[in-house]
Amino acid sequence: MEEMQADASRQQPAATKQQQEVGQSQIQLSHASYMNRYPDEYEAVREYLHGHDSKNKASKYKLLSFGSATGEEAITLATMYYPDNGGGGDNTVIFGVDLHQESIDKARASWVAATTNNGGKIIPESKVTFLNGKDTSISAHGLYDAIFANSVLCYHGTKGVNPESILKKYPFEQFESSLGYLDASLKVGGVLAIVNTNYHFSRSEISKRYTPLLAKCANFVPKVDAETVAYERSDNKNGMEDCVWVKKEANL
């Protein structure tokens, strides 16, 4: 089974030119973030990866924080969820990609500080790498075991935002292209973790090759129904939606 998945991963097509252009364009303008922002999602991904790879005692995963802003998500993953590097256990490496150089510079400085102030635990600086997505495609370091795309696949928080402006600034077709850009760099059997999007992942063509885990996350970004040009809230009264999806097969 693992060999079949590896073969399928190697056969995955690269992102199309359109997917590349959309994936390397900024949608969400906010750079605000904080440590351990989506704990339920992070824990669900960790449990899946460790359970999926239970026979490998020296696990090494490659993770991507897409839209990493000032680095809190990548640093959270490195220090709280996959902290053991070099000790014979979890040797996970994490890449953070953003398009805002000032945020990337802050992220790098924060990571250097984290490696020297982590309760005496030694974490190599090479565990986390921050990249400018304008200069480097995410595929340069793929394929990934997990991709986190949280609060980035949305046009939200701007004054006067409404369904019409979302459909104009970030139409569903671009959402599909964004997903295609991520999908092209994700392993078969890997997970796509997404919180806060303008559209339901389950309505995309790409979702047909994914299955949701039993993981729910709170979403505060309202969805848009392109047909009625209206906001569409979550079916769940508490705003909880599927947030972790497993890639079942490649787009051959």
Image: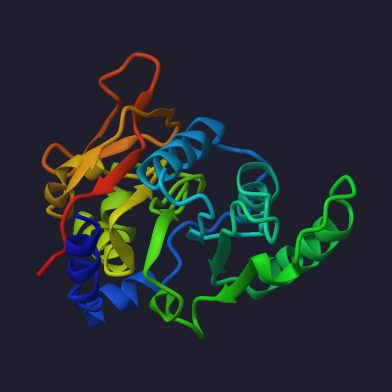
Residue sitting at 30 percent across and 25 percent down? 234
Determine which quarter of the picture holds residue 178.
bottom left
Quarter of the picture holding the C terminus: bottom left
Quarter of the picture holding the N terminus: bottom left
Residue sitting at 35 percent across and 44 percent down? 52
> Relative to residue 60, is residue 211 depicted above or below?
above
Residue sitting at 75 percent across and 68 percent down? 125
Q: Position of residue 207 (x, y in %)?
A: 18, 48
Residue nearest the observer in this picture, 229 or 252: 252
Q: Position of residue 33 (x, y in %)?
A: 64, 47
> Relative to residue 194, is residue 125 depicted above or below?
below
Q: Is residue 148 left or right of residue 92?
A: left
Residue furthest out toward the bottom? 135
Q: Position of residue 153 (x, y in %)?
A: 38, 53
Residue nearest the observer in this picture, 31 or 247: 247
Q: Is residue 201 left or right of residue 48?
A: left
Residue nearest the observer in this picture, 172 or 130: 130
The count of marks equals 0
Task: Indicate how the structure is coloured in the image.
Answer: rainbow
Residue sitting at 36 percent across and 37 percent down? 243
Q: Position of residue 93 (x, y in %)?
A: 57, 63
Q: Is residue 126 left or right of residue 179?
A: right
Determine which quarter of the picture holds residue 114.
bottom right
